[in-house]
Image: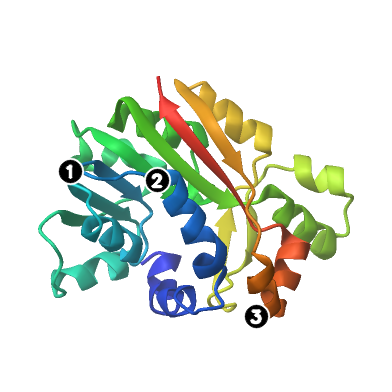
Amino acid sequence: MNVWDNLADKYEGLQIREDSLDTLVEFPIQRELIGDMQGKRILDLACGSGRKALTLAHEGAANVVGIDISQNFILKWKTQKKPDNLEFYQGDISNLSDIVVLQGQKFDIVLCFQALGYSTNLKGTISAIRDFLNVGGRFILTTAHPFKFVVEKQERDKIKPGEAYRDESSYCFPSMWDNSVAISHATPMISTVINAIVSNKFSIDRVLEPDMSEDQKQRFPHKAEWMNKYFGIIAYSCSAI
């Protein structure tokens, strides 16, 4: 059993709260970058509970395939009703070429939301993503902002910002969904991510660093305080060339 099997139950409950940053910032910007999905084949990597994949399947995608490392996320769909254009399979984004069901498949859009840092093979994961895409297909990536880890490392390890930013080693910390469970996350610099993308035959169309709206900040000041300290997310929209 991997750590995500232990986190699966608590993860979804916290993600769907009205004050979760996924609800306030992350999913809105992700949907904006996805854009028109009508008739598209979509691969959702590290899909978690499958909630977003289900939404896309209902909103016009021709076919959505969700992949996640946690058997607890995937097994629930064995007993839950889902549309015919939605499929879920277990697999590790660090080893996408080992996922038999994906071999030979091509997609119009590949998504990786808040998960690339859990890959132990950044370049290999992005290379495999390019292989799954048709020419002109799109890769939508969102990750925790690298400066979030800079702030955390400064506080925990008492090191300077530049040192914290340039340390790209795996960072182990208590999960925000259950602080009794430790998770490991790569902490690449922005340039490292960009270079891994462009070296794998992608062009980068947009890079966004979204913030909460003023109304959201008034309604949820505790989340605004968190965003002001930890920066939130960085989002990339890329095209396969």
Nearest to N terminus: mark 2 or mark 3: 2
State whether residue 67 appears in this view: yes
Identify the residue at image location x=49%, y=79%: 17
Q: Residue at x 23, y 41 (%)?
A: 40
Instruction: Estimate how packed mark 2 is, as few (under 14), some (14 to 19) or many (20 or more) residues with alpha carbons within 10 Å.
Output: some
What type is the residue that disc 2 sits on? Ile
Residue 220 seen in the figure: no
- Amino acid residing under circle 3: Arg
Q: Quadrant of residue 85?
A: bottom left
Q: Amino acid at mark 1?
A: Val
Q: Which residue is mark 3?
A: 219
Foreground: disc 1 or disc 2: 2
Give the numbered dot on residue 101.
1
Pointer 2: what residue?
34
Q: From the viewer's perspective, is residue 149 above or below residue 127?
A: below
Q: Locate the C terminus by quadrant.
A: top left
Instruction: State yes or no: discs 2 and 3 in contact (Cβ < 8 Å).
Output: no
State the quadrant of the N terminus: bottom left
Q: What's the residue at 20%, 34% (across, down)?
A: 103
In space, the residues marked 1 and 2 are separated at their CA atoms by 24 Å
**Mark 3 surroundings: few (<14), some (14-19) or many (≥20) residues within 10 A:** few
User: Residue 81: x and y, percent?
Assistant: 13, 72
Q: Secondary structure at mark 1?
A: helix
Q: Earlier in the sequence, mark 3 or mark 1?
A: 1
Q: Position of residue 29 (x, y in %)?
A: 51, 53
Could you tell me which secondary element the residue under label 2 belongs to? Answer: helix
Residue 19 location (% of width, % of height): 56, 77
